[in-house]
Image: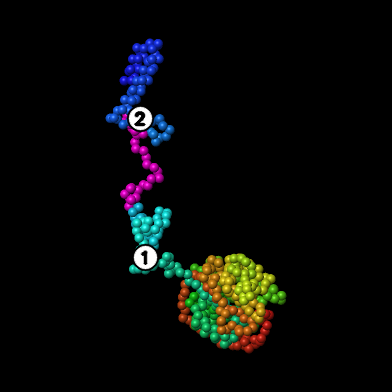
Amino acid sequence: MIASAIALIFIAASRSQFRGSVISILILILLNFGYTMSDGNKDFSLAWGEGSTMDMHGGRVDASASTKHHVEELKLTYESCQSRRNRRRLFKRSFQRAQRRASTHGYTLYHGQWMTAKQLGTEYRGPSPDTPPSQNVTVNPGQKRKRLTMMSWNASGLRPADWDWLQIWLGQQRLDVIALQETHWPFSGEWQQPDYYCLHSGNNGRSAGVMTLISKRLCKPTELSWDEPVPGRLLHVRIHGTSRGIDIINGYQHVHAHDRMDDRTIFWDSLQTTMTAIPSRNNMILLGDWNTSLTARTTVTGLETYAMDTGRATGPHHDDSHLFHNILLHHDMISVNTWCHELGPTFRFQHRHSRIDHICCRRQYSDRTSKQATYLTEFPLNAHEGAHHVPHFGFRTEGLAFCASEQTCRMDFAQEVGIVQAMEKSDTADPTTAG
């Protein structure tokens, strides 16, 4: 209607009347706009065409004009794919679980926030008395670690009477491995006691002598093999397992003296050769009197000092201690009796003291329990005066199954005669130079 009126005005009007016609056109436009605003039967909305806005949110036509029809726009990509009914169900279940936790403990974590029972619309009732408390972590009995209990002691000469008493004492204990040094027995051999397999290495003299006792709970006699790399000084015993074995090395190093340094070097070389030949999959244990202090602060030792009445002490310094330390470091071994600050020295003689006896094992088989070694300061066979070594024992994990054996036998007559003859030839000697 407006377009036809404008056309008539342009046709009828002359040039002189053109300016008045422009004013008339503006009046007609304003009247048509007022008519559109006052029409109550139609909703007022501008019919924007596609592309008339800067973004696609304005691409849908809201007016009832005859423009291009658009389908319903897609949902947001991060919107949950679950239906509203399922979301409400999940929300209710999680909320109910939160309420149960809050009623039992008084508070709980819900939607990333700590909330009390009151905030969740419930009240604190505490745990039910009919429900027994459950363990936080349930350990499978089949996965519990089996442990070896080990003891090491320098006997400073083991007489027949002391040997008999030691058998009585061991019968009251549950030790798996016992390492004895300086037995002063001259022969090498093996025999069985009621509870232990005994393997001894001697040097045909009254000095030295090392013996290892293996509990019959660990293996059968056919599963044992042994070797003496240094007779009377170094004894290697292997317990053969199904997948891996246990190698036990019992050592007694020469004393630290100027005329014994070559012998000590030969001993360290033999120890290194023996340990290198052991498969890395086997458990390896070192027990003995090494006559060497470990004072270097590395992963081998826990504490380089030990407890004394006057404070902490390091003991004497040995020139070749780095050799023993490097051997342990090369094979990733640790000394388990150097991790407790309350343990004192292992050797005492008058005013002298030192920590020269060590139990060592591989780091991968060591845990906190295995580092809790203990000294038997009240051991009845300890000398009340003079030089003496304190027996000490430790724990470590092992991977062999226990098996029983009923075969028993004792030391033969020739071995007993050899011990008696060695004891008769023994005399009093300075403990700082003997060995």
The percent coordinates of residue 338 (x first, y second) are 59, 71
Q: Which residue is mark 2?
A: 47
Alpha carbons under labels 2 and 1: distance apart: 66 Å
Which is nearer the eye, 54 or 292? 54
Q: How is the image coloured?
A: rainbow
Specify whether residue 52 is in view.
Answer: yes
The percent coordinates of residue 63 (x first, y second) are 33, 31
Tag 1 or tag 2, which sits nearer the N-term? 2
Q: Is residue 111 above or below residue 318?
A: above
Which is nearer the eye, 237 or 158? 158
Left/right placement of residue 200 relative to residue 402 reads: right
Residue 74: say if magenta: yes
The majority secondary structure of the magenta stretch comes to loop
Which range is magenta?
60-89
Disc 1 element: loop
The C terminus: image quadrant = bottom right
The image quarter in which residue 432 lies: bottom right
Q: Which residue is mark 1?
A: 127
Spot the residue most to the left.
Answer: 41
Residue 73: say if magenta: yes
The image quarter in which residue 114 lies: bottom left
Q: Tell me which residue sits at (57%, 70%) in the image.
A: 339
Q: Tell me which residue sits at (48%, 71%) in the image.
A: 146
The image quarter in which residue 92 lies: bottom left
Question: What residue type is disc 1 on?
Answer: Pro
The N terminus: image quadrant = top left
Which is nearer the eye, 245 or 379? 379
